[in-house]
Amino acid sequence: MSDNTMSATKVKYENTAEFAEKMDEQDPLKEYRGEFLFPKVNDKQCLYFAGNSLGLQPKKVRQFIVEELEDWEQWGVEGHFEARHPWLPYHEFLTDSTARLVGAKPEEVVVMNTLTVNLHLMMVTFYRPDKTRFKILVEGGSFPSDKYAVDSQARFHGFDPKEAIVELWPRDGEKTLRHEDITSKIEELKDSLALVMLGNVNYLTGQAFDLKNIASAAQKVGAFCGTNLAHGAGNLHLKLHDWGLDFAVWCSYKYLNSGPGSLAGCFIHERHLGQKDIPRFEGWWGTNKKTRFQMGPDFDPIPTAEAWQLSNPPIFQLAALRASLELFDKATISELRKKSELLTGYLEFLLEQMTEYIQITTPKDPTQRGCQLSVTVGGDAKALVKDLSKKGVICDFREPNIIRLAPTPLYNNFEDVFELCKVLKSHS
Ligand SMILES: Cc1ncc(COP(=O)(O)O)c(C=O)c1O
């Protein structure tokens, strides 16, 4: 038995089915599991631990999309005004929920495009290199698309990525970054640093960074600071406005459960809003809503994050996300995070009893991680993940040897975690 202290709660974990059952009975968020559709293998509901990759389908998604299909059938183009949720302002129906989710003011967020597209759009605005200040600080081992994005931005501005992109790696013999190494690197790069661009949570190690202090260190040396919250949105309790980040981007198909390839979010701090001459790529969905349909030639930016919108958005994807965000609004991210710390703590407790077979890469400190634990195993991790999936245990493998296990508080429970570890034990 071990002693785990998480937020205000002190729980003595036990490696028994009865304990897991008791925790589930006491769980104030237990009803949300029933709001989701679980895949089945051999007619049996899967143990699903891949919400870090693709979240499960909320039952309401189908209804919300069908409503839009019906309104399209009934109204044709008039649906832009006459649909139950008119399409013209449809993205606005998601604004307040999105702002609550990431700790922003409503005017600071917008749902649009996909993740890598938004990352590029943000760098158009926030990567403004000159001859001396042109470097971008990223974490070593960032998601490949993020690395391709920063490299190509450097090249686009005429810089060699080998000089412009500074990758920060853990110290020799360590698996994750030390916070003091991030801030001291920022201080060292000083006048040469244009942008700090970190993922939060890191997709591979599961490490979450202290964004507040990193943003403050970056801004102290005159650099902008942005983050990719692909693995943080819907997972961590974020306070983007108060932390003072310049921008953030995230996708909605992982912890936000809005379906494969679905839309992305974007945060731009209010201090950058309402500036007509800020560098930005522009399209008609970013111009003044009152005059947009006068079809004039000049762009008049909306004084919110909406000014960065390019196109009229895909309504079916927005409908899926709206269904999912309703659940987050009801459950609240602060309560979800409390459960998440307990649930991931339980997974950690059980895995630590198999140390001869499984090693955890993700930091132990709950403030430095979300729900995901990344682990290595003795033996072929890729083959193990394949084998598990045939048995109805879904998690994922990432090169070179990492298995990611993400108990998500909306639809996973303690019995799932207990069962998962029982299966893992049988493979050890
Ligand atoms: C950290 C991170 N960055 C970028 C991406 C790429 O996202 P997209 O294909 O939506 O642009 C992903 C996708 O999983 C990711 O996890």
Image (cartoon, rainbow, N blue to C red):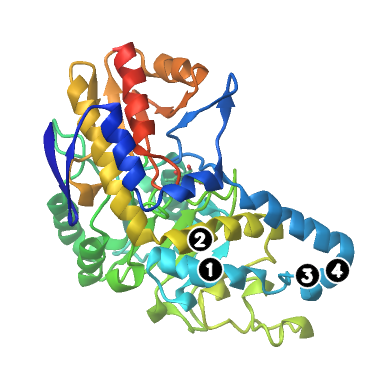
Q: Distance of mark 3 from mark 4, alpha carbons?
A: 10 Å
Labelled disc at residue 110: 1
Does mark 1 have its CB less than 8 Å from ligand 1?
Answer: no
Reading the image, the residue beneath label 2 is 265
**Of callouts 3 and 1, the N-terminal one:** 3
Q: Quadrant of the C terminus?
A: top left
Q: Distance of mark 4 from mark 1, alpha carbons?
A: 24 Å
**Of callouts 3 and 2, the N-terminal one:** 3
Q: Are marks 3 and 2 in contact (CB under 8 Å)?
A: no
Amino acid type assigned to the residue bearing label 1 in the image: Val
Local secondary structure at mark 4: helix
Question: What residue sits 30% from the left and 34% below the top?
Answer: 20
**Of callouts 4 and 1, the N-terminal one:** 4
Q: Residues within 10 Å of mark 2 (few under 14, many from 20)?
A: many
Q: Is residue 195 left or right of residue 72?
A: left
Q: Nearer the viewer, mark 3 or mark 4?
A: 3
Reading the image, the residue beneath label 4 is 77
Amino acid type assigned to the residue bearing label 2 in the image: Gly
Q: Position of residue 344 (x, y in %)?
A: 28, 40
Q: Is residue 378 left or right of residue 281?
A: left
Q: Is residue 106 visible?
A: yes
User: Which residue is at the front of the view, 210 or 12?
Assistant: 12
Q: Is residue 373 visible?
A: no
Q: Distance of mark 3 from mark 2, alpha carbons?
A: 24 Å
Q: Where 270 falls versus 389 (above or below)?
A: below
**Of callouts 2 and 4, the N-terminal one:** 4
Q: Are marks 1 and 2 in contact (CB under 8 Å)?
A: yes
Q: Where 287 falls versus 195 (above or below)?
A: below
Q: Quadrant of residue 86?
A: bottom right
Does mark 4 have its CB less than 8 Å from ligand 1?
Answer: no
**Of callouts 1 and 2, the N-terminal one:** 1
